[in-house]
Image: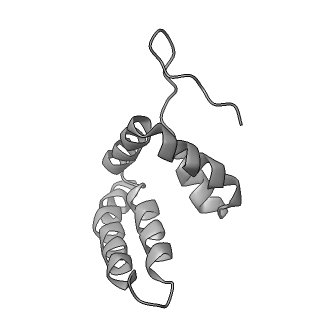
Amino acid sequence: MKSIKRWMALPLGALIFVIGAILFPLPIPLGIPLMVIGLAVLALHPLMLRAFRRWRGRHPEASRRIGAIVPHLPAFLRRIAHRTTPPSRKGPGAPPTVQA
């Protein structure tokens, strides 16, 4: 059952994201919430979860902004945002950690 849910997350999340992207230019604000929900559904798949972690690791400013809005998100989006947080890098050459 878990495997079916993971593999159904890819096409379903992509479909929701594409519908949100199509509705984005309309004056009714449906595009952005649908795109966020689509990304959240995509994050259920392990490959996409790794890709989101990698992206957030490469873009620390965007990751910091995501971290700033996490307390204001609904619980299911908060869980997904925490799951996509990249592991902290320790040692020489690691970027300094930002204290909130």
| Left or right of 15, for residue 80 | right
Farthest residue toward the bottom? 27
| Left or right of 15, for residue 68 | right
Along the viewing direction, whichever of 27 and 35 lies nearer the viewer = 27
- Image coordinates for residue 74, horizontal then vertical, percent: 65, 64
For the C terminus, the quadrant is: top right
- Image coordinates for residue 64, horizontal then vertical, percent: 56, 43
- Image coordinates for residue 84, horizontal then vertical, percent: 48, 45
- Image coordinates for residue 27, horizontal then vertical, percent: 47, 90
Along the viewing direction, whichever of 57 and 87 lies nearer the viewer = 57
Q: Please give the name of the residue rendered at 70% of the width and 54% of the height, measured from the top-left corner.
A: 71
Up-down relation of residue 88 to residue 70 (above or below): above
Give the total of numbered labels: 0
Residue 84 in sight from this viewpoint: no
Up-down relation of residue 6 to residue 12 (above or below): above
Q: Please give the name of the residue rendered at 33% of the width and 44% of the height, measured from the top-left corner.
A: 51
Q: Please give the name of the residue rendered at 56% of the width and 22% of the height, measured from the top-left corner.
A: 96
